[in-house]
Image (cartoon, helix red, strand yellow):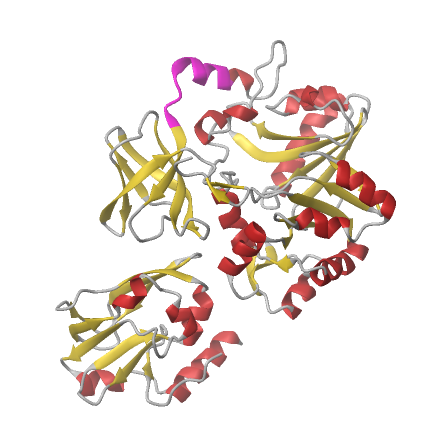
Amino acid sequence: MTQKTVLNDTHRALGAKMVDFGGWDMPIHYGSQIEEHHAVRRDAGMFDVSHMTVVDLHGARCREFLRHLLANNIDKLKVTGKALYSCMLNEQGGVIDDLIVYFLGEEFFRVVVNAATRDKDLAWISRQAASFSVQVEERPEFAMIAVQGPHARDKVLGLLSPATREKAAKIGKFVAAEGDGLFIARTGYTGEDGFEIIVPEAQAIDLWNRLRDAGVAPAGLGARDTLRLEAGMNLYGQDMDETVTPWEANLGWTVSLDAGRDFIGRAALEAQKAQGVPREMIGLVMDDKGVLRHGQRVATPQGDGEILSGSFSPTLACAIAFARVPSGARDALQVDIRGRLVPVRAVKYPFVRDGRSQLGA
Amino acid sequence: MQEIPGDLKFMKSHEWARVEDQGTVTIGISDHAQGLLGDLVYVELPGVGDTVKAGTACAVVESVKAASDVYAPVSGEVVAVNEALADKPETINEDAYGDGWLFVVKPDNLAEELDELLDPDAYAEQLEEDES
């Protein structure tokens, strides 16, 4: 059964091309994926991300539970509203999912996980939570709208009541505030500033329409994908999964090997680090014409690797990708495109940040 | 949706062919196909002098979303390719039946192969069936 967000009819009325995305009927674009991409880089765009799963955790031992569940250290969250990006690992150090967790009180944390992994995530979190007496509550009654771009915050703030506006205007990056019935987080998946807004379903269509009236361009999941790739952000299922450790997915920065914290997967991660990590994820740029795609073979002097997320970058007007290659492979890289070996360059990423190319920076 | 010109013939896989006055055949993809693909960003064309065979893949069009093979509607020798597409592949999105043409073939076996193709009405009918 295909699921629909509360905004489904709204997307269709806007002429969206709908596709199946992890069991959800979602807009891939409303006419031009590239124009929607540019709207977010240059002004403000919005995405319906209501398919994502909001899970609230309640209980006296919440923090202790999250110390065990997450590879990043929940104790970095000291101020109410602060958010943390983390992987959730299995015992082998493989990534079950990546997520954002918000600190809303010593006995109340909110987690947002991917839609495609909802069932296994809920099962895993519930299983681990039992011994900590933490209550796991999914919140399907919420929709979520991500408003992103250099003018996104101003356009959202203009729609809020004075009291909420004052609160939301003050929050720093990776912090959330509440007001007007909304949960407003300064987070995103585009490399631009903006908000991700969790909104009760009953208010979602009205909020979407008011944002449109304020000049925010509807943008589909197609643009969301090229934006996050340019911004150097991983996509679960494409860049990492349960067979890949954070070391192999360039997510080492999210792993906190702080003394005395026994999180799930830690032993496996430490063992792999001690032995030497066999593969790593790098950024690629192709100067020749063409498009890098998921699954293409990357030939290197150290052996073969593969393209993970790959696409055409609308901002840079060339193909960019993440690839997993044998550790150390940086030079003489070629990608097999329909039998033809095309040279590619390993580059540091993000490829684009705050609207500007980072290549050669 | 652009109106389908009456002088075109179509493959079920959305390529069009137009027999020109001098007997060559110009080939492209339909407006419907470009709509399915979305913004085109790259086109890989055969070389002038290459031989193409009806029903086999001989070009690739790539959108942000996906790469798609283009099949030759007729067999023959490639006598021209649309080099302007290298820098402006979006021309196909803008004008699939005109400036967005892909390549021109000097056909080997035109009369017989032409019979295999759909006329505009039959193609439009197929599109309606696809959508229902």
**B53 horizontally vs A288: left or right:** left
Magenta residues (range): A268-279
On the question of residue A151 being in view, the answer is yes
Asked if B2 appears above or below A34 in the picture, the reply is below
In the displayed structure, A95 sits above or below A334; it is: above
Q: Where, quadrant-wise, is the N terminus of chain A in this rendering?
A: bottom right
At x 19%, y 88%, the residue is B111
Q: Quadrant of residue A39?
A: bottom right
What secondary structure is the magenta-colored segment mainly? helix
Depicted B119 relative to depicted A11: above or below? below
The quadrant of the image that shows the C terminus of chain A is: top left
Q: Relative to residue B79, is residue A296 depicted above or below?
A: above
Residue A274 highlighted magenta (yes or no): yes
The residue lying toward the viewer, choosing from A85 and A318, is A318
Q: Residue at x 68, y 29 (%)?
A: A127
Query: How many marks do you count on the picture?
Result: 0
Q: Is residue A137 visible?
A: no
Question: Where's residue B110, x and y in %?
Answer: 18, 84
Q: Residue at x 52, y 44 (%)?
A: A228
Q: Quadrant of residue A266?
A: top right
- Please give left or right for residue A306 compared with residue A45 in the image: left
Q: Is residue A43 left or right of residue A235?
A: right
Residue A169 appears at what percent x and percent y?
76, 41
Along the line of sight, the residue nearer the viewer: B106 or A165: A165
Q: State the image coordinates of residue B75 (x, y, percent, origin top left).
A: 18, 76
Q: Position of residue A334 (x, y in %)?
A: 26, 40
User: Is residue A310 inside the magenta stretch?
Assistant: no
